[in-house]
Structure formats: structure tokens, C-alpha cells
Image (cartoon, grey):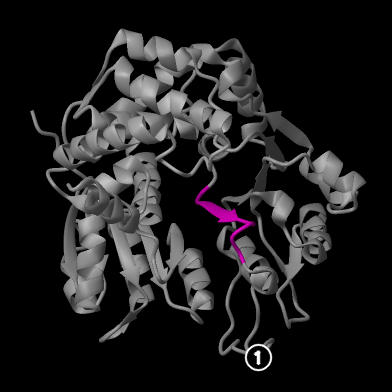
Amino acid sequence: MELEKPNILIVEDNKKLARLFQEALEEKFNTMIAHSISDARRHLKWAQGVLLDLQLPDGEGISLIEPSKAINPDCAILVVTAYGTVQKAIESIRLGASDFLEKPVDLDLLVEKFDQLIVSSLSSNDLVYSSESMDQLVQMAKKVAKTPFPVLINGETGSGKDVLAKYIHRLSGRKSFIALNCASIPSELADSILFGHIKGSFTGAHESRKGMVAVADGGTLFLDEIGDLPKDLQPKLLRFLDSGTFISLGSSKEEKSNVRIIAATNKDLKIMVSEGNFREDLYFRLATFPLELPPLRERIEDIEKLTEHHIKALEKILGHPVEIDKTAVKLLKAYHFPGNVRELFNILDRAAVLGRGKISSEEIKFLTLRPKIEKATGKDESDFWSESKAEAQRREKEMILEALAASGGNKAAAARSLKVSYKTLLNKMKRLGI
């Protein structure tokens, strides 16, 4: 039985570029192309995700964000921006876009972003666990959820800090949940992005804009990677946490916002404080309620439940049933997962493609042993082709043929499943005579 794939609307006036995006996405998603705003508006009801160019022949693509969210609040909107229009991309985040990518677009990253965004929207945002350590954490999260106090979530990369933040927000009864990755915003725009600016406050400020703190009034503002917040902006955030008031860039008027701050980091803020890279008073203010998210290797009993949960979402992404055998699950439980839950989901995604919907121990062995081989040989972990030369050529050819067969001959999709660039795959195919 074939399951329905999620729908992605590609809004791009450059026909060649639009087709390139479509080829990259079509393995996992139903896609449709619109070359103008007027054309796109006719298809917003159909879309679960939108890939949005900001410069279109009949206006600015940013005008499609609010109607998209009005029709489907969970619509995943990924903005594509050219050099020099980052400010517009930031404005799109304020209006409800999920994230943005700069041109030239990395096609692998494009698919990965929509994978994460769509799977997140298809899931219930419930925490999935069965371990005692996670149960204790959830009980603490429930106690703090309905309070106005800030929360600081500590945890390794990929451990699920954003999922925990959304869980706390959902229990809080607050309105909107707005997320901002502090590591991805240009330092010169950080003040404007967080607290807004008035017209003329800096070069290019042609009109006044609200910041995230004002936009999230009555809701939750999730500040991911808080350790990367520019140091000169830290006193202003501290003042806001203490008083609930702020002053927009270029203004002298004090404003208020009833927003709850949840911050997250994979860095040790105590060490950053001791090194003078993070304000001690801000750390203590954020850490009113610290929550420590344990790495996946310390909660092995959660792996099977997380696997079952992700496979259900994965079936909707791939458009067909996915099965995993018991031996494969045992192998997953024996793996140390340096990339945590994100790595688990990544392995399941790749194994499902390579196994054509049937995840066996062979796929799991290959995908979990490869990092050890790379480490032992001293080769780059991002290099897929890391085995001995004679064996590697045989294995390369075998894996490429398997990936091509699983993707129906779609080279872009095969490259993504192998975690190599499209250009690398073409070069390998030429060298191996495929």
C-alpha cells in the first residue's frame, strides 16, 4: 500500500532553478512549481511546505507567508535568499517562515531542512521516551511549564532540545512558539532581530520593524544556541528578563512584552562564563530552571520507542511502508550515537532508502560501523568512500547501483541517500563505468 507523500510548493521564477529544486525534492515529496505570486496563491491549500524565493515578477515572495500560515499554521516555509537580501530573510522569519537558505542553495541541505520541518509538523511534538532519566526530566518540565520563569535546556547536539522546548510551550497554554537560532543570525543584525528597530536607525532601515521579542508577545521565544548570542547584546537580554521591557534599536521609547524565554545550548556556559565569553549574571538569570537532557547513549531503553515513532513519520515522507527487523533494532541499541537522536533518525532515513523500505541488520551494520572505519583510518568523516581501495571500488559500485535502484534512477535522490554531493556521485559513476 502506497502512502501519500507530503506536498511541497516551489515558488521560483527561474525555471531552470525551479526544476533543479524539484529534482532534489521529488524523491520524498510531491512537488509543484509556481513561477509567480498569483500562481502560488492558487495552490497554498495544497501545500504542507513552501520553498519560497523572495524576488518574484509580480511582487515580493514574503507576501505569501501570512496567507500560507493562515491556511495551514503548520506549513513549513523555507525561504531562499540571494546575497544582500538577508535582512528580508530575517523579516520572513518574523512573519512565520521556518528558516532560510542563501543562494547558491546546497541541495542536500535543502532536502534535509524539509525532512526535519515536515517530520516535525507530522509528529505530535510529544516527547518519546521510556527511560527513567527522561521521565524525571519530563516531570520537572511539567512543573515549570506553566510558570513565567525562563528555562535553560542543556544537551548535546541532536539530543532533542527543541522538542523539549516545544513540549514545555504546549503545556504552558501560551500562544505562539517562535524559534530563533542565535548561531545563524548575523551579529550586526542581532539587536534588530531580537528587539526591533525604527526607521532610519541604521543604513538600510527604510521602515520600522518589530523584533522577535515583540512578535512573540503572549507566547514563547525559543533561543537556540544561546551561547552564540553576541556579547554586546547580552546585557539587553538580561534587562528584558529582569523587567519585561526593552527599547528598539534607534528608539528612546520603552516597550513591554509578555513573552516566556526558553534558551538552549550544547556548550558549557559555566566554562564560557569563567573564560569571559558569557555574562555570569545572564547565565544565572537564564538558569532559573536548568534542564539537562541526557544523551541517547545514556538512555538506551528509549531507542526502540524512538525508532518506532520515527518510522511512522518516515512512511509519510517516503510514501510507502517501512519495516525494521529485530536484529537491526538490537544493533541500534548497541551503537553509541555520538550524534544522538538526530543521528538515529538520519541512520533510519538512509537505511530505509537503501533497503527499499525494509531495514535489516546489513544496512544498520554498514551505517553504524562506517564512522569507526573512518576514525581508524584517519579519513574525513564526511567522506562516504572510506574503505580500502580494492574493496571500496566494489562496494562503491554496489552501493551506487542500490541507491539508484531505490530512487528509480534519480541521481539527485541517490546522491542524498549516500550523503555525497550530486557532483561527487556523477564523478564516481563515470570512474566506475556506471
Q: Is residue 195 left or right of residue 434?
A: right
Query: In this view of the protein, which residue sits in the foreground, 297 or 205?
Result: 297
| Secondary element type, mark 1 | loop
Q: Residue furthest front?
A: 390
Give the answer, above or below, for where 115 lies relative to 197. Answer: above
Q: Amino acid at mark 1?
A: Gly
Query: In this view of the protein, which residue sits in the foreground, 430 or 261?
Result: 430
- Identify the residue shown where x is 75% and y is 57%: 244
Residue 133 % position (x, y): 62, 15
Location of residue 208 (image quadrant): bottom right
- Identify the residue shown where x is 18% and y is 48%: 433
Residue 359 % position (x, y): 27, 21
Give the answer, above or below, for where 398 lies relative to 432. Answer: above
Q: Is residue 387 left or right of residue 16?
A: right
Query: In this view of the protein, which residue sits in the foreground, 300 or 3?
Result: 300
Location of residue 158 (image quadrant): top right
Residue 392 % position (x, y): 35, 34
Q: Is residue 48 visible?
A: no
Q: Magenta segment, which residues?
A: 175-185
Q: Residue furthest left?
A: 1
Give the answer, above or below, for where 302 lies relative to 213. Answer: above
- Identify the residue shown where x is 40% and y is 70%: 104
Residues packed near mark 1 inside 10 Å, few (<14), some (14 to 19) or many (20 plus): few
Q: Which residue is mark 1?
A: 200
Q: Is residue 184 magenta?
A: yes
Q: Is residue 121 visible?
A: yes
Give the quadrant of the N terminus.
top left
Count of labels in the image: 1
Q: Is residue 402 magenta?
A: no
Residue 128 % position (x, y): 46, 23
